[in-house]
Amino acid sequence: MILRNMTAPFLYVAAVAAATTMLPARTLAADNNQDYRRKVIGVSGIMNNTSTSMDSPVTRAEYARMLVNASAYRDYVPAQSRVSVYADVPMTSEYAAYIRIAAEQKWMVGYLGGQFKPDQPVTLKEAVRGVLALLGYGDEDFSGDLSGGRMAMFYSLELNEELGRQPEEILNRADCVNLFYNLLKTEMKSGGRVYGTVLGCEVNSDGEINPMELVDSALSGPKVIPKGRQLGDYVPFNVQQASIFVNGEASSYERLKDHIADHYVVIYYNTTAKTIWAYIADEDVQTGRCVVRGTIENIYYSSADVMTPTSVTLDGDDQEYRLGSSEMQFAFSIYGSLRVGDRVTLICEKSVNSNDDATYVVIDYVED
């Protein structure tokens, strides 16, 4: 099987999933601010599984993981902790390594008696300590009432945008989406750059986060996963902790596993962000990214240029799949590797006009 990595055309749509990326970020945010923020935080890898209920309270253990995933330490988290820092956090816990890092960096603190209380919901006051620490602020930056000083800094930096909680209130997942999104676009204490640059994100001229650079920096794929196979065999990180998008929508590991049980699936992934984009082969979609599989039946050329192919068809399928880029045209030309009779998986962008006529443009492929 030959894998082709046509990164740029894939990223154009995938980074913010169902959002229309031809529009500027401010337009997207105005249309559905929370949904856009949720997708950015999912793509960044800060929050795992953004498809679950946004109303669910976030525990202190989960928040410790978010802090680490939002930091440069995310690349150095061991698969399993060898140390138990707190009496109530066994080293076998999936959160142990994250809690250890958060405690060592003083992003979070424990309780008397060597307890961390990992299952206790995190409060805004506790959460603020963590994000301010990521920005470079420590105890030395606040005098007198440290907690009060941190909250004053929190409001001064406008980290409370879209976040209407009091210091002692507990945070849910939607609150954490807003908190970390605000963190990404806040200038660091050292000045000169916003925090999002630590993760490879950029800020648009209108002040909204654009995660394209983050995704583009380490994208792998496409990979075809035959039905019935294990997702973990194709991805070099813990897939159960990944942010997952299926056909452009936020999803979960369990849902993707169900798809793989019955369908061929094409995936792209970003190891740094621990994010997976999956597309279900031969599943009908209204518009957007889709995947089709088959044997190349015809390769069509323009009468004006007999050296440059314009479209292809697959066996048993009357639909023409247009070759929209020079890379795709080269792949299907006499100079490329694809020929009539070859088995291929096409990744396409589908659009529908006012007459309900569908157009498919090939943006990537996998040769079997």
Image (cartoon, rainbow, N blue to C red):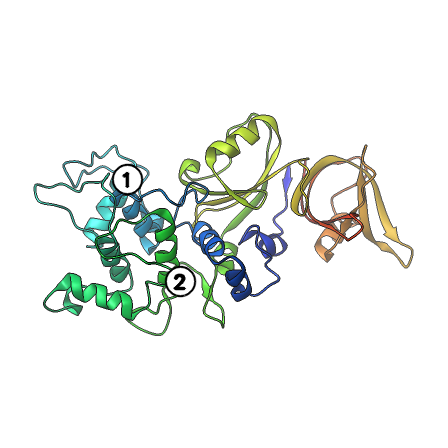
Quadrant occupied by the C terminus: top right
Q: Secondary structure at mark 1?
A: loop
Q: What is the x, y in percent for residue 284?
A: 68, 38
Q: Residue furthest bottom?
A: 192
Q: Secondary structure at mark 2?
A: helix
Q: Which residue is mark 2?
A: 196
Q: Which image quadrant for residue 326?
A: bottom right
- Residue kind at label 2, given as amino acid type: Gly
- The reply to whether callout 1 and callout 2 are in contact (CB within 8 Å) is no
For image coordinates 31% across by 43% down, the residue present is 57
Q: Which residue is mark 1?
A: 95
Q: Residues within 10 Å of mark 1 (few under 14, many from 20)?
A: many
For image coordinates 39% across by 47% down, the residue present is 47
Mark sitting on residue 315: none
- Left-right relation of 1 to 38: right
Residue 56 showing in the rendered view: yes
For image coordinates 19% across by 55% down, the residue present is 106
- Left-right relation of 246 to 102: right
For image coordinates 39% across by 53% down, the residue present is 177
The relative height of residue 313 versus residue 273 in the rendered view (above or below) is: above
- Residue kind at label 1, given as amino acid type: Tyr
Quadrant occupied by the N terminus: top right
Residues 338 and 28: in front is: 28
Q: Residue furthest left?
A: 113
